[in-house]
Image (cartoon, helix red, strand yellow):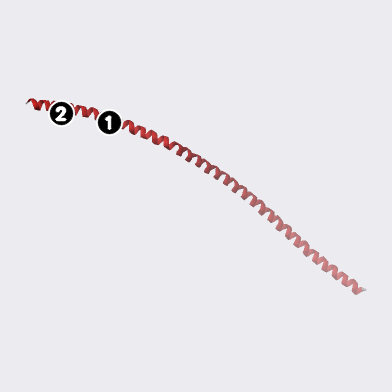
Amino acid sequence: MEDLLKQILAAMHGLKADMEEVRQDVSALKADMEEVKQDVSALKQDVSLLQDGQRRLEQKVDDIHQSVVRIEEGQPLDIYAMLQGVDRKLVNKDSEISVLNKRVFRVETELELMASKQ
């Protein structure tokens, strides 16, 4: 009977040691779980920052696209205005050349008349 009690006592000590080991393992698991929770929280913050950055980047790209569209829409009008300016200058120069040609023609005519009188 005494042997049986010793065996039971030894088994109890073994169970107690096993139980302590399980407690340590559970404690380690809890610590690991807390670390995982902190890591997940940090990852969530990082993802949130990335999403905010992506939204800002998309907004900037959209703004650039709108600027390009405005520039492209305005280019034909700018070119047309430049061509009108060139045309006006050409018309003015043509008028000046015409006036000069008339003067030269008159002078040549007078010279011919003078030459024929001599």
Q: CA distance from mark 1 to mark 2?
A: 21 Å
Nearest to the observer: residue 24 or residue 64: 64
47 and 118: which is toward the camera: 118
> Which quarter of the rendering shows the N terminus?
bottom right
User: Mark 2 Cα within 10 Å, few/some/many (few <14, many 20+)?
Assistant: few
Which is more N-terminal, label 2 or label 1?
Answer: 1
> Which amino acid type is marked by label 1?
Asp
Query: Residue flagged by tag 2: what amino acid is it?
Result: Glu
What percent of the width, then of the height, locates residue 31? 72, 57
Q: Is residue 44 left or right of residue 99?
A: right
Residue drawn at the location 62% of the way across and 47% of the way down: 48
Residue appearing at x 47%, y 37% in the figure: 70
Q: Residues within 10 Å of mark 1 (few under 14, many from 20)?
A: few
- In the picture of the structure, the residue carrying the numbered disc 2 is 108
Q: Which residue in the structure is indicated by mark 1?
A: 94
Horizontal side of 55 relative to 106 (left or right) equals right
Vertical comparison of 85 with 40: above or below: above
Residue found 88% across the figure and 72% down from its top: 6
Please tell me whether mark 2 sits on a helix, a strand or a loop.
Answer: helix
Image coordinates of residue 4 in percent, x first then y, are 90, 73
Quadrant location of the C terminus in the rendered image: top left
As drawn, the residue found furthest toward the left would be 118
Residue 60: x, y in percent?
53, 43
Secondary structure found at label 1: helix
Quadrant of residue 72 within the rendered picture: top left
Q: Is residue 102 left or right of residue 114?
A: right
Residue 25 in the image: state x and y as whole percent: 75, 62
